[in-house]
Amino acid sequence: MVVLLAIVGLAPGCGNGEGNLEDAPVQRGTDGTRLRGEPNVGAADSPKGLARGAEADLPPPPPPPRAAVARRRGEQVIIDYRFGPLPESKERRPYQIVTSVDPVGGRYSPITVRRRIRGRSGRVVQPLGLDKPPFDVRVSAEAKTGMRSRTLSVPLR
């Protein structure tokens, strides 16, 4: 089993105040257009960088997990999640689960893991990180279009 770990917020140019946001990777929709919130989206004369009506063209986000439970096992966090009925539309269907363990008031960045969703429920086991409790475990779903669901937050001691 391969685990993909990314330390969020440490890479230059990824919107963390270092580097240029223009150099950050760009998420694109299925039709090749940039997704909401990316630099240089929409008309050049738009003050917010998003052309009028462009948000209406974006597919709706996938549904978030209905429930998520997190518990510690040594230096790991076990996150069990469950979805309700999954949408038929491939644009809205959750493709991967994104989990993040964030130390509340800690000095280290959160550890974020992405795993492919294989059914309506599942389990993610990921490292706890170097900080001390309490932690905030965040869980969201992402569709193949790159759209992300609302984020669930679960406290962990």
Image: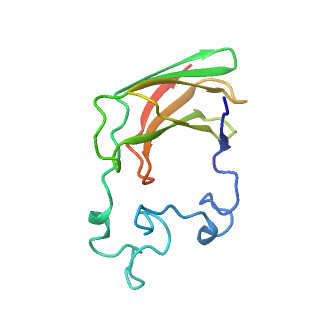
Residue shown at 65%/39% (left/top)?
4
Instruction: Say if 128 sits above or below 112 in the image.
Output: above
Camera-side residue of 13 and 142 = 142
**Residue 150 in view (yes/no):** no
> Quarter of the image containing the N terminus?
top right
Residue shown at 62%/23% (left/top)?
133
- Toward the bottom, the furthest residue is 45
Return the x and y of residue 107 as percentages of the image width and height: 69, 39
Residue 76: image quadrant is top right
Image check: 63 left or right of 49? left
Instruction: Say if 35 sits above or below 41 in the image.
Output: above
Return the x and y of residue 106 as percentages of the image width and height: 65, 35
Camera-side residue of 75 and 29 = 29
- Toward the right, the furthest residue is 130
Return the x and y of residue 108 as percentages of the image width and height: 69, 39
Return the x and y of residue 118 as percentages of the image width and height: 46, 30
